[in-house]
Amino acid sequence: MLIDRRRVLAGATALGGAAAIRPALASAQTDWHALAEDVKAQMAWSWDRYREHAWGKDEIKPVSGSFSSFPLKTHHLGLSLIEALDTLWVMGLDSRFQDGVDWVKGNFDADVDGEVSVFETSIRLVGGLLSAHHACGDAVLLAKARDLADRLLPAFATPTGMPYRFINLKTGAVREPLTSPADIATYLPEWGTLSRLTGDPKYAATARKAIVAVFERRSKLDLVATKIDVLSGKWRSRQATIGSYCDSFFEYLWDSWQLFGDAECRRMYHVCTAAILKHQQVWKDGSLWFADVDFETGVIVGTEQDELASFYGGLLAQGGAMKLGAAYTESWAKVQKRFGVLPEGYDYATAAPTQLANALRPELVDAAFTLWLIDWDQRWRDIGRVHFLAMKRWNKAEYGYTDLADVTGDPKRQADHCPGYWWSEQMKYYYLLFSDTPRFDYNRNYLSTEGNVLMGFKRPSA
Ligand code: DMJ
């Protein structure tokens, strides 16, 4: 059976179809409410450490109690704080949410003479400000999101409409035309939302032009590669992958249909997905994987899988390929079972990790949450529970949760970095997966590639 999350997400509205009604769930083994409360307690504890040791800084170092900046090299924009806001809100951590909003209103200023990644700044900061605005309706948050997007816009002034990779937030100076489908095409949900909220169509139009420009350059096999020059529009690699460099290009084709009813984006998604399933699908020992292939010949060029690709099971299921999405997620769940925490790279041909670190990643629980929204099957909650409990066991440090340098040892060796996405992604997925919170519409919602909720919050009536 093909199950389409669009029915779950859009109900009987613009996109059509009957709303899937979430059944009451019960588990004999797990007290999901208690687990959700534990997630919330971990979030509050981490926020309080950040509040005390790195307030307004971009990313805390949870082992040393220091901090580092990103996406600017030498200036802090409060990245973790902004990424955390809608997670705090949906958990009902209201005084901490308000504290964060007050910091943004009083301190967040993007007028900085420094260079940022256009992609990272958009998914994390523009998206974070928009989801915080969705949570509380504060107009200042929307104004700051718009100001930031305006500073990124000049990057798209290229002959192809595909953006440069970096831009200076103050001067608008651009750098690096050699970039990737993910860097070019991960804007439309945030920027379309900006257009919808501000009434200015330029954000959606710019983002849409870029995503279409990537699609139009696909090979005769309907595959895209990892590197492209935005000035000439020529490909600079031959490697097609569902992992790093391409992942969110596919995701945002589907999402733009899901969020805005953009039928052309849905068509492009299905063209790309059919090609991936035809040329990259590999079954090994009963597990589904996706090989890297030459984008023009389809010849396999690599069997390594990025951990980043583990989100893809959720996307496949959303797009209607439920069985394959479930199978791919189960493939990764087996690797999780083996190592406790997923390694950054894994070779399905040798069944060995290719990179030993884990950057405190959310992708597997992202897929589990997405699948659960579609069929409410208990096994997706179980994958999330295992993911959360492993993180509590291995990643917790004195000042927060940290990434790992080596997932294969016992104990696993900790590094010293809590990436901004941790605050926006897995903590939110765990909580939504376990809590049944009334603040979230489980039948009609949208979460961005960074986990930012752009549709689906339900404000409690006063
Ligand atoms: C997040 O920043 C986003 O999900 C992005 O699309 C890729 N993955 C990272 C977190 O691992």
Image (tube, rainbow, N blue to C red):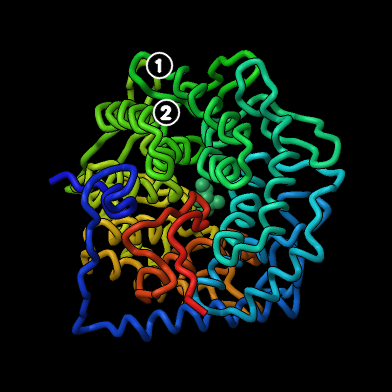
Q: Residue 82, relative to residue 115: is it above or below?
A: below
| Label 1 with label 2: CB-CB less than 8 Å | yes
Which amino acid type corresponds to the residue marked 1 in the rendered image? Ser
| Image point (72%, 53%), residue name | 144
Q: Earlier in the sequence, mark 1 or mark 2?
A: 1
Q: Give the residue at mark 1.
A: 219
Query: Residue 351: which numbered mark, if any?
Result: none
- Res 174 quadrant in image: top right
The local crowd at label 1, few if under 14, some if 14 to 19, many if 20 or more residues have their Cα within 10 Å, is some
Q: Give the residue at mark 2.
A: 240
Residue 428 position, x and y percent, is 47, 67
Nearer to us: label 1 or label 2: 1
Q: Is residue 411 visible?
A: no
| Image point (82%, 55%), residue name | 75
| Image point (43%, 39%), residue name | 256
Query: Is residue 241 shown left or right of residue 139?
Result: left
